[in-house]
Every structure is written in C-alpha cells, then in structure tokens.
Image: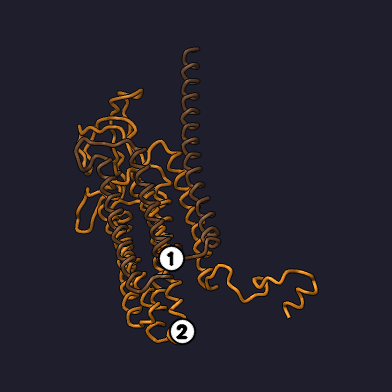
Chain colours: A brown, B orange
Amino acid sequence: MGHSYEESKKIATKTIIILAIITIAEVFFALTGKGYVIPGFHMPHWLIGGVMIVMSIVKAYLIIYEFMHMKYEVPALVKTVLVPTLLLVWAIIAFTAEGSYWQNNRARAKNLTSAATHMDGDHK
Amino acid sequence: MASETAALHGENTNPSWSGGTEPFKISYGKLMMWYFLLSDAFTFAGFLIAYGALRFSMPSWPVPDFVFSSLPGGIHHKPLIFVTIMTFVLLASSFTMVRAVQEGQKNNKNGVVKWMLLTIVGGLMFLGCQAWEWTTLMGAEHMTIKTNPFGTHTEAGVYLEDGHDVKKGDTFHAGQSYLIHQHDGHFQHLSYKVTEGPDAGKTKQLEFGPKAFGALFFFITGFHGFHVLSGVVFLLIICLNSASGLYEKRNNKYEMVEKIGLYWHFVDLVWVFVFLLFYLL
C-alpha cells in the first residue's frame, strides 16, 4: 500500500473532511436551488440535478478509491469491478428516460381520448 | 512436473499458468468480497432502476423536502436536516472503519478493537435514526407500502373545507405538496375548487399520491438498512475475534478487518446514491 502509517492516517482524515464538505455543499445547494435559503430564488431543475449528480460521483470516487483502496489495486481488477458498475449507472439513466417516455405516451393517449369524446359530443 | 507436462504438449512454460500465483495481486478472500459487492450493486441497481423509471413515468411525485422534513422533538418543516445528520453518522463510521484497518496493518490489537467499536456505535446510531424516520412515516403520517398519503398538486386551487393544517379559503399552486391526514382512522380527502387551467371552476377532492412511492421508499431504504444491520452483526463478531487474539495468530495483518471494511464502505457508498435519488433530487 505504499504509504506509511502516519501518511495513510493523514490521507484518511483529509478524505473524510472533503466528503463532509461535499455533503454540506450538496444539501446547501439543493435547499438554495429550491428556494428555501433566499426567498423567491429558484434554480432550474436540470442545474440542481446535474450539480447533485456530479457531487455524488465525486463522493463515490473518494469512497471507492481512498477508503476501499481501489487506487492501489492492479488495473485488471479495477476494470472487472468498475466496468459493470458503470454499465449499471447507464441502465439507471436509460430507464429514467424510458420512464419519461411512458409518461408522455400516457398523456398523449389521455389527450386523444378526451379529443375523441369532444368530437362525439359535437355530432350529437 | 508442470514443466514436464508443458514440454510434452509443446506449450510455453509461463509460470502464471502453473498455479500458486495471484494475477490480481490480492488475496482470494478480498477478491471475492469485491465480487460479492459487485453482485450486491446489481441488486441495488435493480431497485434504483425501478425507482427512476416509475418516478419519471408519473405526472407528479411527492416532493422530498416536504415528505422528509420532521426531526425528533416535534420539529417540523426543516427539510433535509434529519437525513443529513444520518448521512454524517454513516460517513463518520466509514472513517472509524478506515482507522481500524490502518491499526490492523500495524498489528495493533487494541487500536483495531477501539475503532471497530466506534464503527459499531455509528452503525447502531444510523439504524436508530432510520427506525425513528420509519416510525414517523408509518405511525404519524400513515404511509404504508400500499398507501401513499403524500401528493403534489398539478393545478392551482382553493380549499373548500378545513383540514388538519389548512383552512377553508387557503389557496395553493401547482407543484405544491400536500399530506392527506387521518381523522378518527379515516383519511380526509379535502375538497377544493380548481382556479386555473382547463378544469377551472370544477370541484375536486385531494387524491393519494403515486402508490409506488411508499413501496419504493420502504423497500430501498429497508434493503439498505438490512445491509447496515447485518454489517453491524459482522462487525461485532470480527471485533470480538480481534479482541480474543484470533487474527493476531493468523498473522495476516488483520485481513478479516479489511474485508468487513470493504463491505462497510460499500454500504456507505450505496447510501450516497439513496441520499441523492430519494432526498436531494
């Protein structure tokens, strides 16, 4: 593991402080974006979501690479673990998009039905 | 013997293929812990995929700042504060776990036991917080895996009757959340008049929010909580074994502590994403 005891102790302390700061920043940003901190101030939803996702990925990196020592494993092992995990992240994003597609489809079906009932009414 | 066989078949004599080496330069136990965690990540991803797909297929979804805004001691309307405390408890316990592993590298038995005990305390505190959160949601707000009394308005309107925390004549706008309170064991679906949009002027009643919300919440946080609980049990066993000197005898720098450490950090890692999807977005 290449580091002396004192060095690894320092790295661990530094990592936990960074993780704590990111968490506080996340919550503060979420609350500010949704208008809880400054009255009347809102941020667009995509911006809040984007910043949150990036910050969470940084946190995940720190936990996996520093706390779980992935940094010190051989590249082949890193790949066998991280490639499937990244595919899972892609699946989550893809199914989220699929979800919005279902919603749009339902809304369209509903509009078509109500349009059809209106036309029925006109004929009578 | 190995070289003889290789020579017989006319193959190369690469020692990697004669056994006894570790291609990934990691012990068998630790490698298998990594692959167990990978398989566990698949299970959690299954849950999170269901969450993402269902949430975005609904026209409205309960706003987390509204749902998770209570603290112990009767404090309400403080969004995200309690879950942030839970996140910090879990992060702190991850740090104490790192310290336990480092003491193990130094073969310091007392250090390992001390930091592992602190990790166990952190795990138990997290479970306590989660128990309180679930009790509030089920006991006071009557959310179950089948009923979700939390909803979000999709159109602006005005209430036509008095409720638990609203009065007749109170107005609301689209995107605002509500909770259907129980009165004498029955949900009170307050009636309201729509003031904007194509349905303006119509009288409607508050409806339950998306049913999937309750089921997803209890199953995902429950599955995570179950991981924390089993982690605490394993930590306790390994802590006792360390204290009894079992790992000292094995003379492998407390590898067992390292393995449970990997598991514990994984539980923390999953919480990062549960926190993101359920509470922040």
Q: Nearer the viewer, residue B121 or A122?
A: B121
Count of numbered tags: 2
Q: Position of residue A50 (x, y in %)?
A: 37, 42
From the viewer's perspective, tell me whether residue B251 is left or right of residue A40.
right
**SS for dot 2:** loop
Q: As drawn, is B200 to the left or to the right of B33? A: left
Residue under the image location 40 percent in, 51 percent down: A57
* Quadrant that contains the N terminus of chain A: bottom left
Q: Residue B258, percent across and down? A: 43, 73
Indicate the quadrant where residue A19 lies: bottom left
- The disc placed on residue B42 is none
Relative vertical location of residue B22 with respect to residue A95 in this rendering, above or below:
below
User: Do we see residue A46 in this rendering?
Assistant: yes
Residue on which disc 1 sits: A69
As shown in the figure, which amino acid type bears the numbered disc 1? Answer: His
Q: At which x and y percent is residue B25? A: 54, 70
The relative height of residue B94 versus residue A100 in the rendered view (above or below) is: below
A32 sits to left or right of A50: left
> Is B96 on the left-hand or right-hand side of A93?
left
Give the letter of the chain under mark 1: A
Residue A71: quadrant of the picture: bottom left
Amino acid found under the numbered disc labelled 2: Asn
- The crowding category of the residue bearing disc 1, from other C-alpha atoms within 10 Å (few below 14, some 14 to 19, many at least 20), is some
Q: Residue at x 45, y 87 (%)?
A: B249
Identify the chain of the residue marked 2, using the numbered disc in the image. B
Residue that carries the numbered disc 2 in the rendered image: B251
The CA distance from mark 2 to mark 1 is: 21 Å
Please determine if labels 2 and 1 lie on a single subunit: no
Q: Nearer the viewer, residue B142 or B47?
A: B47
Q: Is residue B66 visible from the viewing direction of this image?
A: no
Element type where label 1 sits in the image: loop
